[in-house]
Amino acid sequence: MPERTIEDRLREEFFNLLPDIRRVLWQLEAEIRFGTLQILHRLKPYEQLVVKSRVKECESAVKSLRRRQEGGTFDPEKPGHYSLLDLPDLAGVRVLVFPRSRLIEVDDALRTLFTDWISDPVLDDTGAVLAPKYNGHFQDLIPKIQAEYQVVPMLIGLFWEVEHTAIYKPAPALKGKAESEPMERLNAGVVRALLDFEAEYEQIVKE
């Protein structure tokens, strides 16, 4: 019988951790919904605040951990060296906000709840903060499981849902092609266009 690979060990670890990951996700989502409830009640008819949550998929977690290693590979001589507990986002919540002017308000409200979580913002192609992002854990719940939350402009977040499948996790035949330099330029162009749309919309509303 062939020896189990590092990937096989990590898959087993994932499913052993899955009940705890789900508990952490439920806690994170509940606290975020509570922390943004007053903002939700104050939204104008054209404004939106949507909370989405997800448990990282098994294969996605294994690939993510592999990418973090030197050379993007696991060392077969160190099968016990790797653990999915090193990932900062086994559980994740994304708060989608429209228009973007509400983003700072939501971010500030959540920072009062997650004061010790580490900031790791998503940056655009110019180095400016596109979306606040934080990771941490619940010390009094399951401290070994790390979680992540983001506060994202809604139009950007919806585009990311398409982009994630088309570029980040493309079909095998598109691997490499979808991540080409022309596609990266077009991707950045879409993000800028969506931000420009929001800025113009907000200006119209103010007038």
Image (tube, rainbow, N blue to C red):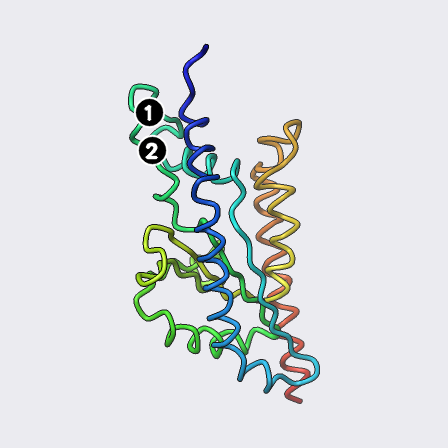
Looking at this view, name the residue that lies furthest to the bottom.
Answer: 207
**Callout 1: SS:** helix
Q: In the image, what residue type sits under mark 2?
A: Tyr
Disc 2 crowd, CA 10 A, few/some/many (<14, 14-19, 20+): some
Q: In the image, what residue type sits under mark 1?
A: Pro
Disc 1 crowd, CA 10 A, few/some/many (<14, 14-19, 20+): some
**142 vs 125, nearest the viewer:** 142
Q: Position of residue 92 (x, y in %)?
A: 49, 56
Q: Residue at x 29, y 31 (%)?
A: 81
Tag 2 residue: 82
Looking at this view, name the residue that lies furthest to the right.
Answer: 45
Q: Residue at x 38, y 58 (%)?
A: 135
Tag 1 residue: 79
What count of labels does the image hold?
2
Q: Position of residue 13 (x, y in %)?
A: 42, 36
Above or below 64: residue 137 = below
Measure the C-alpha gap from mark 1 to mark 2.
7 Å
Indicate left or right for 78 with 205 as reference: left
Indicate left or right for 1 with 200 as reference: left
**52 vs 204, nearest the viewer:** 52
**75 vs 55, nearest the viewer:** 55
Answer with the quarter of the image where residue 142 lies. bottom left
Residue 54 is marked as: none
Q: Are marks 1 and 2 in contact (CB under 8 Å)?
A: yes
**Callout 2: SS:** loop
Q: Position of residue 9 (x, y in %)?
A: 41, 28
Above or below 81: residue 93 = below
Q: Residue at x 61, y 66 (%)?
A: 154
Q: Position of residue 66 (x, y in %)?
A: 41, 33
Q: Residue at x 29, y 24 (%)?
A: 78
The quarter of the image holding the C terminus is: bottom right
